[in-house]
Image (tube, rainbow, N blue to C red):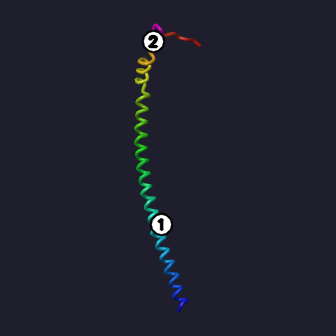
Amino acid sequence: MNTRASVIGVLLVLIFISAIGVVYSKHVSRGLFVESRRLQATIDELNIDWGRLQLEQSTWATHSRVEQLASERLGMFVPDFKQRVMVAK
């Protein structure tokens, strides 16, 4: 009877340890899921910012914007027809 009782005791301890392991792994899994959702939200925000920055870059690089800055800041201008010189090869 002692052998049977000790086997049952060992099995009960193993079942208890297994149950604790299941609870712990579920807890860790939920924490990782929450972290995953948070990181996905961050990725979404960064993708929105990236799209906004690409749009802004294309706006700043338009021909009219570059021409405006060249004339205002650098004093550049498009030469008249009489000021143009043809260079032959």
Task: Between label 2 and label 1, give the one nearer the viewer.
Answer: 1
x and y percentages locating residue 80 in the rendered image: 44, 10
Give the prevailing secondary structure in the magenta stretch. Answer: loop
Decide if residue 56 is on the left or right side of residue 2.
Answer: left
x and y percentages locating residue 47 in the rendered image: 43, 43
Q: Amino acid at mark 1?
A: Ser
* Farthest residue, direction bottom: 1
Q: Is residue 41 above or below residue 73?
A: below
Q: Is residue 56 above or below residue 24?
A: above
Q: Amino acid at mark 2?
A: Pro
Of 81 and 9, the residue lying toward us: 9
The answer to whether marks 2 and 1 mark residues whose Cβ atoms lie closer than 8 Å is no
| Dot 2 crowding, Cα within 10 Å, few <14, some 14–19, many 20+ | few
User: Label 2 vs label 1: CA separation?
Assistant: 75 Å
For image coordinates 46% across by 7% down, the residue present is 82
Of 10 and 30, the residue lying toward us: 10
Q: Earlier in the sequence, mark 2 or mark 1?
A: 1
- Range covered by the magenta-colored residues: 76-83
Q: Quadrant of residue 52?
A: top left
Q: Where is mark 1, residue-wise? A: 25
Q: Secondary structure at mark 2?
A: loop
Q: Is residue 39 above or below residue 68?
A: below
x and y percentages locating residue 4 in the rendered image: 53, 89
* Farthest residue, direction right: 89
Q: Quadrant of the C terminus?
A: top right
Q: Is residue 81 above or below residue 7?
A: above
For image coordinates 42% across by 17% down, the residue present is 71
Q: Where is mark 2, residue-wise? A: 79
Q: Which mark is residue 54?
A: none
Q: Quadrant of residue 49?
A: top left
Q: Secondary structure at mark 1?
A: helix
For image coordinates 40% across by 45% down, the residue present is 45
